[in-house]
Image: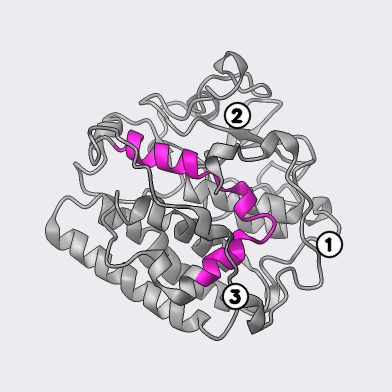
Amino acid sequence: MSGGGDEGNTAYGRKSFQRSKAHFTDRITADGRDGWPVAADRYRLVVSRACPWASRAVISRRLLGLEGALSLAIADPIQDDRSWRFTLDPDDRDPVLGIRFLSEAYDRRETDYPGGVSVPAIVDVPSGELVTNDYQRITLDLATEWTALHREGAPDLYPEGLRDEIDAVMTDVYEDVNNGVYRAGFATGQDTYEGACARLFRRLELLAERLAGRRYLVGDTITEADIRLFTTLVRFDAVYHGHFKCNRWKLTENRVLWAYARDLYQTPGFGDTVDFDHIKRHYYQVHSGINPTGIVPLGPDLSGWLTPHHRQELGGRPFGDGTPPGPAPEAEQVPAQGRP
């Protein structure tokens, strides 16, 4: 999710929407082939809890137990036109990188780079330079390249034998769901909006059919595919249904997807990373082209996220041969106002 840019936040909903590709696509790998070898305490993951793309990385990091190896910086959900801000930290600076805006790490890597300043981003702590903002690749590499630093009992989120199927599912989810809500929400014409909305709900219906008799999207364990669908579903009723006009039905009105989302939310590593306060304030206050008053709605009621889902009756092994992650580090726990 980008922040900053020439036209600022008022441009949201006023110009045609196109998801830009990541500009910085270096990879952090076990062999360091791009010049960035996997190493404990060298890198810092910069995220916004509001952003679904960044939330993928937060969940993956939790599930894999990388908290002690890859530190976390959480940006203010209300960015300004200079980019994501560290105003949640003392003196409005990230305590590790020493910067006030994420754009400073981008500028240290390259000046006059194309595109906005997006999260998730991984920054090299010694140099202060951005390494990558490749939101499609970061989590796959956390699962496959960072294995030497995984916790004991970490799940295999991208099992080799299932990768073709996972990739196919993730492609459909990305095009129609993850990105589809944005195409609908930022549409500047009726036909564009209706087309995106129709594709979104058709894909959600197909996913509900797929999940009616199986607990997870691919195989019998949680994979990267589930993480990517969850980060959109958990935001659906809170922001996409109203703010983005994706309102043919609510998540809570779809029996299968609502139970599936609750199952994941109640799984350690998922719901304990979700901050509904950050999510709502970001979407409703930053996208001033869509919501010029900046008023944040009181609803929806979040208590349903903690109700029984009964998905365990379908079987499945959430973590495969592994184990759940332990509690989130105290400094990373979601404040009370962001939880049901």
Quadrant assignment, res 165: bottom right
Magenta part of the chain: 259-287
Question: Which one is in front in this view, the residue at disc 2 or the one at disc 1?
Answer: 1
Q: Which residue lies furthest to the right in this view?
A: 152
**Residue at (45, 78) in percent of width and height:** 208
Where's residue 246, x and y in %? 29, 60
59 on left or right of 152: left
Query: Which residue, given by chain and number where applicable, does mark 1 sit on?
Result: 153
Judging depth in this view, the residue of 303 and 317 nearest the camera is 303
Who comes first in sequence, dot 1 or dot 3? 1
Residues under labels 1 and 3: Cα distance?
19 Å
| Residue type of the residue flagged with mark 1 | Gly
Query: Which residue, given by chain and number where applicable, does mark 3 sit on?
Result: 216
What numbered label is drawn on residue 129? 2
Who comes first in sequence, dot 2 or dot 3? 2
Where's residue 294, x and y in %? 29, 33
